[in-house]
Amino acid sequence: QVQLVESGGGLVQPGGSLRLTCAASGFVFNSRTLNWVRQAPGKGLEWLSSISGNSGTTTIADSVKGRFTISRDNSKNTVFLQMNSLKPEDTAVYYCARGLGALDSWGKGTLVTVSS
């Protein structure tokens, strides 16, 4: 079955960096678009970025543009989210999700806390 497992979250100071990893299995990885989505405490889901399968075309939300970068390694069935210049408002659970438009599979998320 489809599995998406996020890792790399943790506590980081404002201005710091983290790289999140999503390990995928159970489907043909290089043919599918992968996304990062987050949910801050008490708020709704916020889509952050996506990367297409074979071409690796990326899109990113204006709210994190210039700070976050999505990438993927099709040889390792892995997608990454590099997060730089982190702010307290980036505190959230970060999810990896599969799909283009409709997201049909989700990981369980990894918590990122930005605090001094």
Image: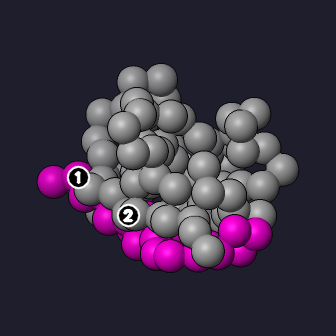
Q: Position of residue 36 (x, y in %)?
A: 51, 47
- Return the disc, 1 or 2, that comes first in the chain's sequence: 1
Q: Position of residue 20 (x, y in %)?
A: 53, 68
Provide the secondary structure element on which disc 1 rests.
Answer: loop
Above or below for 73 versus 4 = below
Foreground pick, 99 / 6: 6
Residue 52 within the magenta-colored segment of the rendering:
no
The amino acid at mark 1 is Val
Mark 2 sits on what residue? 110
Residue 106's disc is: none
Residue 9 within the magenta-colored segment of the rendering:
yes
Residue drawn at x 67%, y 49% as measured from the top left: 56
Alpha carbon separation for disc pair 1 and 2: 18 Å
Foreground pick, 36 / 16: 16
Mark 1 sits on what residue? 2
Magenta range is 1-23
Quarter location, residue 114: bottom right
Quarter location, residue 104: top left
Residue drawn at x 76%, y 69% as measured from the top left: 15
Query: Is 42 situated left or right of 50 in this image?
Result: left
Q: Kindly report the secondary structure that dominates the magenta region of the rendered protein.
A: strand
Q: Tell me, yes or no, if residue 21 can be seen here.
A: no
Q: Position of residue 64 (x, y in %)?
A: 72, 45
The amino acid at mark 2 is Thr
The residue lying furthest to the left in this view is 1
Query: Is 6 situated left or right of 11 in this image?
Result: left
Neighbor class of circle 2 (other Cα within 10 Å; few <14, some 14-19, many 20+) is many
